[in-house]
Image (cartoon, rainbow, N blue to C red):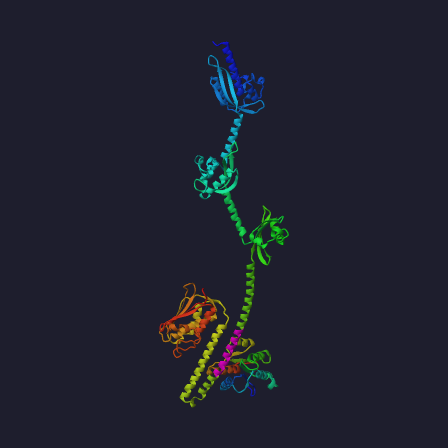
Amino acid sequence: MTGNRIEFLLVEDNPDDLEMTLRSLRRARLANHIQVARDGAEAVEFIFGLGAHAGRSVASGPRVILLDLKLPKIDGLEVLRRVKSDPRTQAIPVVVLTSSKEQPDVQECYRLGVNSYIVKPVNFESFASAVAELGMYWLLLNHSPQT
Amino acid sequence: MATDQQIIESLQELHDLKAALDAHAIVGITDLQGRITYVNDQFCAISKYSRAELIGQDHRLVNSGFHAREFIRELWTTIASGRVWKGEIRNRAKDGSYYWVDTTIVPLLDRDGKPRQYVAIRVDITARKQAEQSLERLAAIVNSSDDAIIGKTLAGIITDWNPGAEALFGYPAAEAIGQPMTLIFPPERQAEETDILARIARGENVRHYETVRVRKDGRRVEVSVSISPIQDRAGKIVGASKIARDITERKHLAARTQWLASFPEQNPTPIVEFEAATGALRYQNAAASQLFPDLPRQMIEHPYLAGILQATAGLRAGDGEPVTREVSVAGRHYAQTISFIRESGCLRVYATDITDRKRAEDEILALNAELEARVAQRTAELEAANHELEAFSYSVSHDLRAPLRAVNGFAGIVLEEFSQQLPDEGRHYLERIRLGGLRMGELIDDLLTFARLSRLPLHRQPVDNTRLVQEVLTELNLPGSGRPIEARVGELRSCLGDPVLLKQVWINLLSNGVKYTRGRSPAVIEVGCAAPNGESIYFVRDNGVGFDMQYAGKLFGVFQRLHRAEEFEGTGVGLAIVQRVIHRHGGRVWAAAEPGQGATFYFTVEGGK
């Protein structure tokens, strides 16, 4: 892991979920290089070096995207579609973290090439451990082409 | 001894007698061999032979050949033995004509009593004979007639009664003659006779008068009667002749013909028959007359005929089935059946009015189209509603769970990180907050499951229920429950249904069985199937706590619970899901239970099968 390298892009509009996810990642010691985007547009700008992030190289990460589906401006499915349809970013693992258990969402995510689909549990302990395990898995165990 | 004077007087007398005889009769004398030796003038006149042609000739010259050999032999035997013969003989004159003579042949005898010659004295009876024969012929005609021929007096007394009358009225002539004519009149027609007699007395005829008479056996007979006056030679009316003919059969046939004719006549279907060659109308019933008031006048030019002739060209040329076709006349529709009557060269047309049927068909078509449009509209509305419901579920799923996660998560964080700083009571309440949040999460999850099951499309396929139940029991992991639970699974008939949804039904019913038998040792869960009327009824029976049947109505409602949460956990959605799935399959679900005695849940999958 390099010093300034962004490891995680966490796309989450709900401040409660954001805080709990960040806490879980911190506790799992995975929180060193986290970029937070509060809506889909911000996420897209960051990933593709646009807008506020103009000039940022697409090649510089992130290594994992944690993506909520229901987002202001550009929704999670659209973000997923853009990442997976761009050859520069399609190798980045995307983990969808969502409250939705609805079948159409799940199916659409897999069709667009999502790497994992996690339903946020109501139970806090489960939520914390799910986030921690996921982060660990994709960051440490999964060897993406960019490492 | 006679004097000369006496002799002269006798001869004169003899001469006078001969003259009288010659004036009255035909006289001929033959010898023993039958040769004519004497004829008088009358003989010559009637036989048309001259005396010269007759004298010396055999008497057989005038034989007509009419009489039988025996008759002639008897004549000769009689006179040869010296006796007188009397009889009527037909002879033939010279010109071939016949004449009848009443004949007396007297043999003149010699001293030994032997015939010497024969004297034949004849009287011409030709006219009488002819009258007799004429009468005999008339009598034969009367006797052989099938018609009743009756004579009666002006007072109405029967005088003549032929065999035809005997047959028609049943009375023998002996019984009828001398009786009044009213013998054969029915009581209500007795007056007719007075009228008839009056007309006869005036010299009028009654011709072909149709009436009713009564037979001896009481049966009535329809007759046509003709009555004519009978006059004597002086022209005085002395009686009447009556000819009666049995017209019962004719009347019956006429009535039957009329009756049969009333069928086509009263048939509401227009029926027309016309000659194919000339277009001449042979028949049209009332319905046809009403439909085409001018048809008889216009037949040949009528476009109706042209159409029929065109349609039946093949039928008339060959021999085919009757032609059927549909035509429209004056705004109404008809189904025509046209047949060709080869013997008469006529076309017969039956035209059934199918206007109402056509209209009904059109209406049905219009209704169907409207119905389809409505179904399409309703489907669209339903799809829209479904879509909204999906969006709603999505919102519930996403938006309700997020704040719940916050309540739960931050309560958890407080308990985890600040537990020491909290008093016991504070910790307890925080724990309660967390449990409440968890429970709400379960409720939301179950509600979403319920909504999703209602929405999922039903994929019917053969379902092996025995295997499905075994799968569910394995997943429920009964040995892992740490208490003795005995599951008895009987033979379960397969059915047509959605295996995913039916598995949910078995899961919910079996897990209920497990849950509500807590505390029973051993807990027994029985699964079976019965088909009392051919319809498969599945059941799950347990020996658990059961419930009071007065609450049975609440069993299948969403969030309805019959037990407190402290006794048995749960959200009250499981049975609502069961009912929803079963109803979507077209089946029924119901329960029977008693508190403390366990419960049985029954369901069917396919209605009536």
Q: Nearer the viewer, residue B382 or B298?
A: B298
Quadrant that contains the C terminus of chain B = bottom left
Q: Does A116 appear in magenta?
A: no
Q: Nearer the viewer, residue B106 or B397?
A: B106
Magenta-colored segment: predominant secondary structure: helix
Instruction: Count up the numbered dots.
Output: 0
**Quick check: B196 left or right of B296?**
left
Q: Which span is picked out in magenta?
A: B384-405
* Residue A21 to residue B87: above or below: below
Q: Quadrant of residue A43?
A: bottom right
Q: Does B388 appear in magenta?
A: yes
Residue that appears at 56% across and 88% down: A4
* Residue B1 to residue A5: above or below: above
Residue furthest to the right in view is B301
- Residue B62: horizontal and vertical position, in percent? 55, 21
Q: Quadrant of residue B473?
A: bottom left
Q: Nearer the viewer, residue A119 or A72?
A: A72
Does residue B517 show up?
Answer: yes
Q: Nearer the viewer, residue B545 or B303?
A: B303
- Residue A55: horizontal and vertical position, in percent? 61, 86
- Residue B119: horizontal and vertical position, in percent? 51, 17
Does residue B336 show up?
Answer: no
- Residue B127: horizontal and vertical position, in percent? 53, 26
